[in-house]
Image (tube, helix red, strand yellow):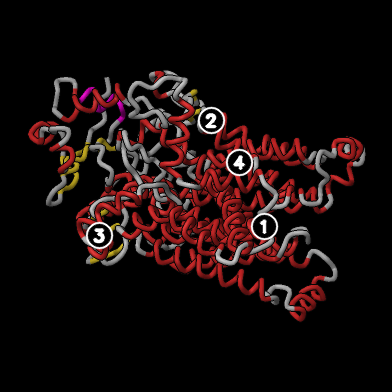
Amino acid sequence: MFLIGAALVLATGGLAVTIARRLPPFLSLGERLVCGLVAAVVGLDMLGVMVARILGLHSTLPLLLTALAALAAVGLLIDRPAWRAEVVRDWAAGTWWPRSLGERRLLAAIILVAAALAFLFGRAVEVSQGAWLAHYNNTWSDWSFHAAYTTTFVYGQNLPPQNPLFAGTPFRYPFAPDFASALLMAGGWSLPAALTWPAWAMATVALSGLLLWARRLTGNLASGIIAVLLTLLGGGLGFWFFLGDAARQGLIGALLHAPQSYDRYPPPVNIQWYNPILSYYLPQRSFVFGAAIVMAVLLLLTAALEETPLFGWRQALAALLHARSWLNGHGVAFLLAGALAGLLPWFHVHSLLVLGIVTVVWALLWPRPAWLLFAAAVVVLALPRLAAAIPGDLSAPTALHYPRLQLGWVAKNGVQGWNLLLLPLVWVWFWIKNTGLFLPLLLMALLTPFALPLRSRLLLAPFLAVFLVANIVVFQPWEWDNTKVLVFWYLAGGVAVGAFLVFVARRWRDGWIASSLVGLTLVASGLLSLSQWLPPQGPTFSWFSREDIALADSIRQSTDPHAVFLTGDEVTNPIPDLAGRPVLMSYRGWLWTYGIDYSKREADIAQMFIGAPNALDLLRRYRVNYVLIGPEELSTWHADPGFFDRSLPLLTKTEHYRVYIVPPPLPD
């Protein structure tokens, strides 16, 4: 069975290469490959979602997608009469191999990035003696709901999708990344493998795209390498606290046994810019898919805009009358970019918001008819999903509504006696604490002509608008989630900061010393916080025990895929995460961040667990089919095992769990 998933991966790669061959020649080889990979993954994933609604998700679906990908690849290869001659010519000329020293250095950088990410992702989940362990606290928590979103498709046949963590409600989360993992599970992959390797692949594609985009904007690879280091490790002044720990414990002792994390401090210190690797790239699977799509869109548009006149409104209006010019190579790039951006609501909504801000500014600076193709693709593909996903729970309390205005974002948290007059100072100090010299360096890079040409500065400048908007408007109930927008500002800003540091290093004889020291201050907090999770001091978290895995296997074999379970709301729950069954209410720490008002259901669940007089009526009203009683239900919800023993038949039990059947109500 594993081979079915592997065949799908290989077919996706083959399709990506043939798509890359057909992309406009103004893109470099690496840029075409990144865009081809993103287009192939996104296209096959969305095709799988549509076909699964008809056929269900079984091993036949990845086989069908493999066959379709292979046919599409062959079709793109041979649709021109001279295709054989083109393939022979490209092979003889070494078109698909790095020939120059610069291309070989770029390839080496991409391989190093891929290897580093493979090491980090490879440690995310460890299978040991039949149990599953997690080596990062954020993957232990975030991958728990990603596991539920994956197994709900492959084991729960949740199509059309309903929210598996709050049964009976719409599934508004962008689930396409987890559906991709479900396809691999249907193809025989284990859950840890299906979660790990697609996330690694898309993170590698995203960072490869960043290297390529930075090289195009700056003309050198060094700026891209710095941008990658910043987007992975960038942080603020938290490393200052390490100096005190080193003075008390000794430098080696503090490095090997760090007493605290240096990337986050609650108010009044208020450092909220967490280590990007640990907070975004490793745990947030939707983010890495979104980042890869964003980089593909930026590559497609940037290459075209480099050949577009600045403020060329007269030429753009004249070109509107010549429809043939819309569908040249540039038009194809805009159309593909629009299609990828339009599908972002299925993958990562915050990425679409970022592209919306940036591309509006770009369209004003570099007008051309092809923007209409881009906009049409975005509107047609994005609006239906946005209409279904964005409204949220309109009956929820105001605190759960979004978006909402919040001047300064979280800068004022913990500040005593502040007022609007002090907000600018508080806000500036907040960002210096959180990003160090990053913002001053970014402004110097964009406002002076030394490090970047004018066009590159104008291409990067709209990301400052992203930064400002995210400091004014909060886009989810949990204000910290604005970092899902700000991370793209930091990613693009890293290109400009990298270019400025390279300029300083090359301009003066000892400039490299200054650049290195400044760069070290930008990544010191990130390096120190990452070191806590690596050998020899990296901790291990128990994700799922052998008992959890065995219980989930039993549940899958003995219950209907759509059966609803009443369980506790712990982060790791074998029923939704491993068995793929929907639960009445999962971890409340997730639900409120999605704007879900769970208060009424929470109160009713408490009554069910304690065996209140109306408990059985509530179970049937919520259409609960089974009840799980385990350590979480006993300790947190004070479940009454005696009530369930007396009232409900037992389905199965293990050392720590008992599962009860809720019989349907008797007919009147």
Q: Are marks 1 and 3 in contact (CB under 8 Å)?
A: no
> Residue 152 or 118: which is nearer the viewer?
118
The earlier-in-sequence mark between 4 and 3 is 3
Question: Which one is nearer the viewer's eye here, 247 or 399?
Answer: 247
Q: Nearer the viewer, residue 105 or 265?
A: 265
User: Label 3 is placed on what type of residue?
Assistant: Ala
Q: Is 267 left or right of 611, judged from the image as shown? A: right
Q: Which residue is mark 3?
A: 254
Q: Residues within 10 Å of mark 3 (few under 14, many from 20)?
A: some
Residue 388's label in the rendered image is 2
The crowd level at tag 4 (other Cα within 10 Å; few <14, some 14-19, many 20+) is many
**Chief SS of the magenta region:** helix
The magenta region covers 616-623
The answer to which quarter of the image holds residue 264 is top left
* The disc label shown at residue 182, or none: none
- The first of marks 2 and 4 along the sequence is 2
Give the residue number, with chain letter if any, for mark 1: 218
- Going 77% across and 67% down the picture, which residue do you hit? 78
Which label sits on residue 463? 4
The residue shown at (10%, 31%) is 643
Q: Earlier in the sequence, mark 3 or mark 2?
A: 3
